[in-house]
């Protein structure tokens, strides 16, 4: 149902941010999301500037019985940040960040990207665990879990959430923390955007300034041996060490050597966040394995590592993703990877394996909504390509690869890496926590107003 003209005008008087409908010259820009395959036409986009705007937008969607999307970084490949004929709460104008150096905490408004947070926290020698790309939104990444360069040292992003201000489906604002609305606080840490609009996050930050890291490329023929090296290295490494494995095509651009450009390689990208002078020594096993094709490691400010791969995945690519958790990188699983990893169809596409052990394992399975505390790894097969004509080739590669690995799955997947999945897969990803999530959903959003997400249905 589309909103009446009169009620949109009412909305304009209620909010301070821009209210954008299809006749507005800003409309096409405002509705565009990161995945270029998504082409949704919302009835109204509200570019909220404060909590009051968010509350008015939530109330407007509820009272007019309209679909409601929440937009932060818009990275979700499913395009949950927009919808057809409904309301979009665009949080991008809400960019405030306050770093408290005494408590080493960072207060972040709901429209920030991780690049914004890195910039603000780095000035004080601090960092909040995030992902590996700086343009990803704080909102979606943290509420779904958050896996990145500091996972083994400091846990998932959601493990570092101290409190959140949330506008709930009734238009009220509540604070969720270990001492207030504890059920909501539990659900927000992994349960995604199911429970309300988080207008402000408070995170624990960590003393991380200069890290030793970067990618190391190996001959693709050695992929299985490199994957075993990665497995053995990261299972035993101190928690200050993080690394992920990748099959990738070396981008045809500087600073990559001409002879490697467009070549498919096996890679390990590492991040040592302990005493920086020990970085070279701590990463030595990755070089001693055999002379790599390229060693791109070195000392760098943490934000430099967090932006190092941004150029590979600009806005406007087509996306198709599949993922799973695995308990271990067993030899049969590695053989499955070797069958499909080397045949990546286009250079932005890749397969990554991230460790989810270390500090992330110190949180119990039922302590937060994020259940897979016993899995050691998650893989994601991500096709990203500029030309829609390459869709079939990329989808086929992802599907064949994912199908091959499925027998080795722990059962579910990381919700932030899931694309075009059904309700059973969502349940499998929360395992025993699903029923409790459904209870919290019934309390805070009984009519499922917030359903543009990996949806948890109200009990
Ligand atoms: C190039 C790329 C790299 C990535 N790298 C990583 C990585 O390293 N680690 C990792 O863990 N994930 C990674 N992801 C996955 C990413 O975490 C998810 O796509 C996530 O959903 C993106 O969040 P967003 O805010 O950018 O997206 P959006 O599409 O804006 O939002 C995603 C979902 O979260 C909800 N949401 C967003 N903000 C709020 C809020 N403030 N309150 C309530 N709900 C909200 C939205 O409604 C939507 O359902 C990557 C994705 C891409 C495309």
Image: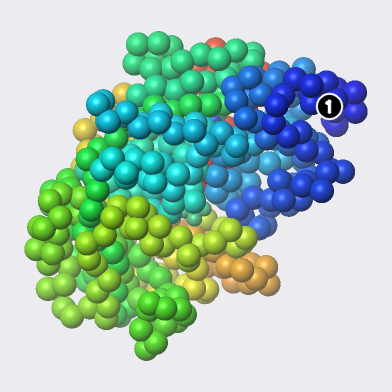
* Local SS, label 1: helix
Q: Quadrant of the N terminus?
A: top right
Q: Is residue 433 visible?
A: no
Please name whichever residue, 228 or 206, is drawn nearer the observer in this view of the structure. 206
Q: Is residue 241 left or right of residue 118?
A: left
Q: Which residue appears farthest toward the bottom when viewing the image?
A: 259
Please name whichever residue, 332 or 30, is drawn nearer the observer in this view of the structure. 30
- Residue 110, above or below 25: above
Q: Position of residue 56 (x, y in %)?
A: 70, 20
To which quarter of the image does residue 406 belong?
Answer: bottom left
What residue appears at the point 61 percent right and 68 percent down from the top-left corner? 386
Q: Position of residue 90 (x, y in %)?
A: 64, 36
What residue appears at the point 75 percent right and 20 percent down from the top-left corner? 14
To which quarter of the image does residue 71 belong?
Answer: top right
- Residue 73, above or below 60: below
> Quick check: is the Cβ at mark 1 less than 8 Å away from ligand 1?
no
Q: How many marks?
A: 1
Q: Is residue 248 left or right of residue 166?
A: left
Q: Position of residue 236 (x, y in %)?
A: 13, 52
Q: Classify 10 Å Cα crowding around label 1: few (below 14), some (14-19), many (20 and above).
A: some
Q: Is residue 33 visible?
A: yes
Q: Quadrant of the C terminus?
A: top right
What residue appears at the point 24 percent right and 48 percent down from the top-left corner? 209
Please name whichever residue, 400 or 257, is drawn nearer the observer in this view of the structure. 257
Residue denoted by label 1: 8
Please name whichever residue, 346 or 212, is drawn nearer the observer in this view of the structure. 212
């Amino acid at each position: 149902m589309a909103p009446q003209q009169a009620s949109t005008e009412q909305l304009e008087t209620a909010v301070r941010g821009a209210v954008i409908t299809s006749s507005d010259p800003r409309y096409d820009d405002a509705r565009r999301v990161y995945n270029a395959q998504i082409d949704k036409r919302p009835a109204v986009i509200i570019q909220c500037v404060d909590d009051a705007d968010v509350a008015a937008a939530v109330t407007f969607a509820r009272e007019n019985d309209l679909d409601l999307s929440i937009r932060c970084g818009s990275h979700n490949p499913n395009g949950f940040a927009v919808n057809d004929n409904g309301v979009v709460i665009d949080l991008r104008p809400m960019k405030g960040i306050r770093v408290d150096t005494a408590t080493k905490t960072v207060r972040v408004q709901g429209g920030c990207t991780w690049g914004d947070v890195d910039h603000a926290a780095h000035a004080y020698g601090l960092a909040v665990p995030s992902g590996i790309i700086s343009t990803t939104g704080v909102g979606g990444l943290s509420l779904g879990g958050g896996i990145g360069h500091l996972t083994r040292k400091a846990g998932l992003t959601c493990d570092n959430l101290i409190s959140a201000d949330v506008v709930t489906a009734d238009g009220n604002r509540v604070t969720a923390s270990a001492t207030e609305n504890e059920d909501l606080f539990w659900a927000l840490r992994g349960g995604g955007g199911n429970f309300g609009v988080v207008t402000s996050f408070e995170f624990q930050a960590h003393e991380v300034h200069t890290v030793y890291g970067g990618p190391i490329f190996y001959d693709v023929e050695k992929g299985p041996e490199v994957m075993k090296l990665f497995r053995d290295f990261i299972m035993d490494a101190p928690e200050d060490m993080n690394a992920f494995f990748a099959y990738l095509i070396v981008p045809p651009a500087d600073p990559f050597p001409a002879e490697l450009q467009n070549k498919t390689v096996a890679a390990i990208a590492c991040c040592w966040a302990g005493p920086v002078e020990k970085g070279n020594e701590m990463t030595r096993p990755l070089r001693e394995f055999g002379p790599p094709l390229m060693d791109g490691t070195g000392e760098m400010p943490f934000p430099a590592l967090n932006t190092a791969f941004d150029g590979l995945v600009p806005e406007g690519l087509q996306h198709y993703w599949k993922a799973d958790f695995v308990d271990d990188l067993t030899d049969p699983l590695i053989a499955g990877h070797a069958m499909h990893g080397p045949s990546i169809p286009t250079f932005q596409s890749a397969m990554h394996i991230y460790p989810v052990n270390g500090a992330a394992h110190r949180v119990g399975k039922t302590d937060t909504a994020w259940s897979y505390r016993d899995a050691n790894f998650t893989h994601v097969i991500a096709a990203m390509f500029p030309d829609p004509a390459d869709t079939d080739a990329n989808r086929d590669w992802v599907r064949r690869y994912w199908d091959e690995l499925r027998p080795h799955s722990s059962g579910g997947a990381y919700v932030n890496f899931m694309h075009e999945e059904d309700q059973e897969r969502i349940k499998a990803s929360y395992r025993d926590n699903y029923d409790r999530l459904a209870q919290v959903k019934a309390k805070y959003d009984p009519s499922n107003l917030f359903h543009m997400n990996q949806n948890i249905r109200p009990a």
